[in-house]
Amino acid sequence: YYNAWTHKHSYGSMLRTHGEKIVVYHGTDQGELYDLNNDPDEFENLWNPPEHASRKLRLMKTCFDASVFTMDPFPPRLGQF
């Protein structure tokens, strides 16, 4: 998505579990949400239908938590010691 010609600079985060996948495109209201148990080939994007809003929010929180927990909590080292 970074090289997409429709947006000047596009970034996204993706989380895949055993049965679900979410892709969140930063700075937009666009995304992708798939039920991999019922749609393993990812043909039906469930991002917009309101009946999947709670699933979307749960996965967005999980994706956010995963990205925060993988950040280095320390400031960059400026010297040898």
Image (tube, helix red, strand yellow):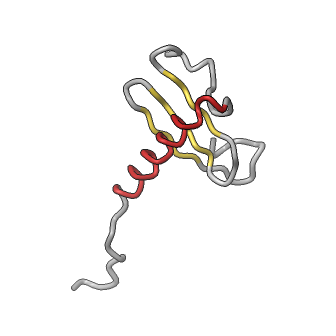
Of residues 67 and 6, the one drawn nearer to the viewer in this rendering: 67
Residue placed farthest to the right in the image? 6
- Where is residue 71? Give x, y as percent: 37, 61
Q: Quadrant of residue 52?
A: top right
Of residues 47 and 76, the one drawn nearer to the viewer in this rendering: 47
- Where is residue 63? Give x, y as percent: 45, 46
Residue 57 appears left or right of 6: left
Q: Is residue 55 above or below residue 74?
A: above
Q: Is residue 57 above or below residue 39?
A: below
Q: Residue at x 70, y 41 (%)?
A: 4
- Where is residue 9? Give x, y as percent: 69, 54
How many marks are shown on the rendered structure?
A: 0
Of residues 22 and 58, the one drawn nearer to the viewer in this rendering: 58
Q: Quadrant of residue 3?
A: top right
Q: Residue at x 21, y 85 (%)?
A: 81
Residue 59 appears left or right of 3: left
Q: Quadrant of residue 24?
A: top right
Q: Residue at x 24, y 83 (%)?
A: 80
Of residues 14 and 5, the one drawn nearer to the viewer in this rendering: 14
Residue 42 appears left or right of 19: right
Q: Residue at x 78, y 43 (%)?
A: 6
Residue placed farthest to the left in the image? 81
- Where is residue 48? Give x, y as percent: 68, 33
Q: Quadrant of the N terminus?
A: top right
